[in-house]
Image (cartoon, helix red, strand yellow):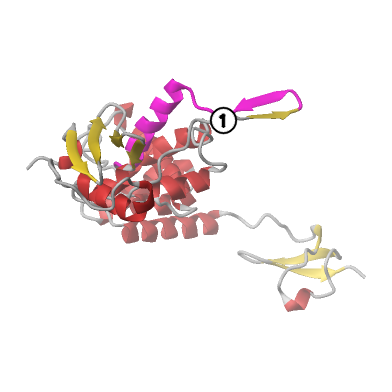
């Protein structure tokens, strides 16, 4: 069965107007037009309604006063449903001048094309999404419609504030894992390094614990997680447990930097025993694995 969201054009007579649905595959853009109306449809909406006409019905219910007729006429074509956005405002060009810096908020045609292309990537695999979001953020391709990257991600993709950054960090880790594969290569479809020992993550949750490690430790942790999973892709829980073990070992491996006889100054903390002793000079009298015993100078 063909997806009605990918069939173009589609035409209907309804609400006193002739409507046409078009799908621009290159720009990943879906639009419903009628005399006096141009309705751009979000990609996310295609998962909420089964067809463009059902989307138009939902939009018409919210905008009855704008339509010439309140009664629906004979309808032809595929039926689709989707929550309809308001018609986009006319392109506005604004400039902010600060000192000698002048910035335009209007996107060029190439920037608009890049934005649509990258937005399509975000709605695909988490790795592609993270890489696309990084470019959207770094190039500030959201500036024509939103003041901040967080607001843009919330409105465009429904992401909460931390999620886009998690995807960006996860993509950076996956890129690093790929670079560390033997010969610096991997098979795109199997997502496995040439020697068959390195399997790449397929979800952000698998990668999230790795972001807390140093870059050189990430491959080690992922390899151990794959081994613990019997040579298969490990769950996020397995990766998290491996990362915790590595962090504990790393912490224990760090030697105590102080020596008996060192002179140092106490830094106040939440320890009630240190109340009133902040910034006092002291002498290290005993060395322990992770702490010291000191004598306060008179």
- State which quadrant residue 125 falls in: top left
For the C terminus, give its image quadrant: bottom right
Q: Is residue 255 left or right of residue 285?
A: left
Q: Is mark 1 on a helix, strand or loop?
A: loop
Above or below, 86 against 234 in this view is above
Please state the horizontal and vertical placement of residue 7, each as a whole percent of the image: 16, 35
* Residue 202 in view in this figure: no
Task: Assess disc 1: are there few (<14), some (14-19) or many (≥20) residues with their C-alpha within 10 Å of its C-alpha.
Answer: some
Above or below, 249 against 147 in this view is below
Residue nearest the observer in this picture, 87 or 193? 87
Q: In this view, does 52 lie to the left or right of 151?
A: left
Residue nearest the observer in this picture, 187 or 2? 2
| Outermost residue, right side | 298
Above or below, 140 against 123 in this view is above
| Outermost residue, bottom side | 272
* Residue 7 in view in this figure: yes
Please state the horizontal and vertical placement of residue 258, each as a whole percent of the image: 71, 57
Segment colored magenta: 99-124
For the N terminus, give its image quadrant: top left
Please state the horizontal and vertical placement of residue 220, each as a whole percent of the image: 38, 46
Please state the horizontal and vertical placement of residue 36, each as a whole percent of the image: 36, 35
Q: Is residue 227 left or right of residue 11?
A: right
113 part of magenta stretch: yes
Residue nearest the observer in this picture, 218 or 207? 207
Residue nearest the observer in this picture, 133 or 93? 93
Above or below, 248 against 6 in this view is below
Residue at point 53%, 35% (across, down): 143
Task: Quickly name the residue at label 1.
Answer: 105
Residue at point 48%, 56% (across, down): 247
Total marks placed: 1
227 part of magenta stretch: no
């Amino acid at each position: 069965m063909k997806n009605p969201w990918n069939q173009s054009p589609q035409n209907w007579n309804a609400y006193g107007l002739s409507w046409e649905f078009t799908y621009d595959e290159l720009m990943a853009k879906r639009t419903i037009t009628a005399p006096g109306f141009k309705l751009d449809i979000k990609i996310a909406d295609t998962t909420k309604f089964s067809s463009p006409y059902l989307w138009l019905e939902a939009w018409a219910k919210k905008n009855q006063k704008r339509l010439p007729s309140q009664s629906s006429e004979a309808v032809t074509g595929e039926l689709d449903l989707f929550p309809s956005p308001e018609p986009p405002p006319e392109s506005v060009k604004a400039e902010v001048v600060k000192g000698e810096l002048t910035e335009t908020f209007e996107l060029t045609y190439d920037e608009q094309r890049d934005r649509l292309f990258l937005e399509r990537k975000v709605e695909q695999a988490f790795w592609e999404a993270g890489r696309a979001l990084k470019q959207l953020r770094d190039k500030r391709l959201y500036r024509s419609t939103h003041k901040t990257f967080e607001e843009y991600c919330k409105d465009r993709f429904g992401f909460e504030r931390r999620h886009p950054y998690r995807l960006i960090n996860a993509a950076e880790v996956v890129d690093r894992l790929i670079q560390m594969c033997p010969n610096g290569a991997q098979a795109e479809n199997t997502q496995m390094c040439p020697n068959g020992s390195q399997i790449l993550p397929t979800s952000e949750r698998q990668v999230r614990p790795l972001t807390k490690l140093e870059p050189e430790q990430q491959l080690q942790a992922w390899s151990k997680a794959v081994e613990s999973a019997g040579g298969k892709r490990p769950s996020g829980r397995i990766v998290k447990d491996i990362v915790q073990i590595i962090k504990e070992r790393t912490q224990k491996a760090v030697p105590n930097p102080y020596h008996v006889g060192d002179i140092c100054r106490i830094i106040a903390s939440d320890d009630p025993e240190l109340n009133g002793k902040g910034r006092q000079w002291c002498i290290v009298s005993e060395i322990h694995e992770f702490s010291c015993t000191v004598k306060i100078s008179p």
